[in-house]
Image (cartoon, grey):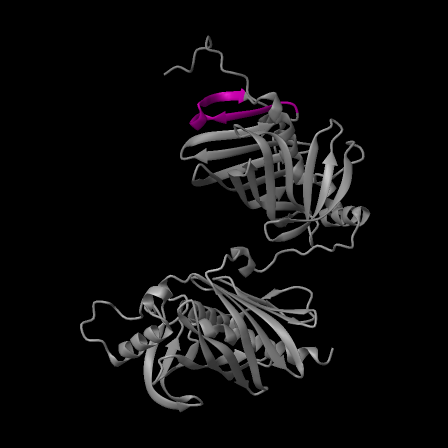
Amino acid sequence: MKGSAPIGSAARVRMARCVTVLAIVLAATPAWSQEEAEPSELDRVLTAHFEARGGLERLRAVTAVRGAATMSMQGMEALFTVLLRAPNQVRMDGDFGGMALIRAFDGEQAWGQQPGEMKPVLLEGDLAAVAAADADVSVQGLVDLEERGYDIELAGREEIESGEAWKLLVTAPSGVVQQVFIGVEDGLERKRVAQVDLGFGLQETATLFEDFREVDGLMIAHRHTMISPMGEMPLQFESFEINPEIDPDVFFMPGQMADATLGLDDVLARYGSARGGSAAEVETVSAVGTAVMLGFEVPMKAAFARPSSFRIDIDLQGLSMILAYDGETPWTLSPMQGVVEPAPLAQETVGAAELLGEFLWGLLASREERGLDVSFGGVGKVARDETYRLDIVTAEGEERTLHLGGEDFLERQVVFDGALLGSTGEIEVTLGDYMDAGGLMVPGTIRIAVEGQVAAELRIREADTGADVDPASFTMPAPADPETPGPAA
């Protein structure tokens, strides 16, 4: 649509800049060392600025801010919401006639969504660096600069739109420079100049801050006017909330997105395609990686064989732990739990063991032959991924809930009642970071939680299909005969 590009570009710039109205709101400490005996001119400017904003005590107490605003542009109005959360998370949402505009920084990555786009994307290169610097300064303010790797320089006085102002040059570790202008008379931030991406490369833009009002003892600008080669764009804030409850997840880019129009047959068909025809030809898999257990990340190796046999060997600082299943008997060796000889697991663990042995080959593989009753539970969610929820009843009457990724249609999580790793209750096996190993999609992470508590996480680094795996390795060794003498010394 011809008009969507200018709207997206201009509003994107507003997003990157307008959050600076709260630049010092989440401040923690002054930018200079408290031990300096003689404050410099820069120190005095910053001191006056902090005092004008409401004082350090109030600034230190602020951890989050929510603002609601309206932007007037091209004869239309758009509603905006700004969220800030310490130390450096920012999100801004705009509604352009039902088309979403999002700009965010989660503390590590910048991402956004333009009007008319179906899903958000990560920002890279200079655009990401500018977004990171803007978020850092907007949320934390001009504080603790040396600790955060910033450099600040007082570049004298300059006449700006609102009168005479102190000019500060703020340089991020990435090299991004922002010009901050502090009013000489009132000590408030009156202007900010930076390089901003207008959709045609980085260009210098300025944001003017006006209409300061007191909110919970803090002076906050309620009007921003951005001046760029595209003209002036005013943003008027109607309200601010200090320290509201904000879900931290909103700052992170959503993961997979599901199509709510798909039905069960569509989902199952795409699941089959995602699994791939060549996957059925793979009979064995060997893998190496690490396991996270008991607070340690330790070496791990694993072997799998159709239809449900598996063995996982974990090296716990010289102590060998084994969890295995040969299709009939699950067994373990776990010295740290007092199991110093291979021992069978309780009968109630069989269901969980079978499932762990089957997931690699596809939990829905040969579903008709296995007597699985599958029904569609609609769109669900696992972590930040939208999913397709499938409710499964096995031939034995056991119930499972399976979540398939909203875009890749691979197993994302399976939930069932059972016993595993010494605990009984609701078990969640969450899968992710898939890799293609000889046509078979192998999850790179397997997290096992019982009753909401993570019991173990397997991180597969490499997987080899068609590996030479000894079938006898899945079977529990016979107990040592105490009557049999050991080897001669």
Q: Quadrant of the C terminus?
A: top left
Q: Position of residue 53 (x, y in %)?
A: 37, 73
- Pick out the residue farthest to the bottom: 159
Q: Does the magenta stretch include residue 333?
A: yes
For this view, does 275 lie left or right of residue 90? right
Q: Position of residue 377 (x, y in %)?
A: 74, 44
Q: Is residue 48 magenta?
A: no
Give the residue at x 44% y 26%: 335
Q: Nearer the viewer, residue 32 or 289?
A: 32
Give the residue at x 49% y 73%: 130
For this view, does 488 lie left or right of residue 380? left
Q: What range is drawn magenta here?
A: 328-343
Q: Nearer the viewer, residue 434 or 248?
A: 248
Q: Nearer the viewer, residue 308 or 1?
A: 1
- Pick out the residue farthest to the left: 37
Q: In which quarter of the image is the N terminus?
A: bottom right
Residue 217 lies, with reference to residue 206, above or below; the image says: above
Q: Position of residue 236 (x, y in %)?
A: 55, 77
Give the residue at x 65% y 30%: 354
Q: Position of residue 393 (x, y in %)?
A: 74, 33
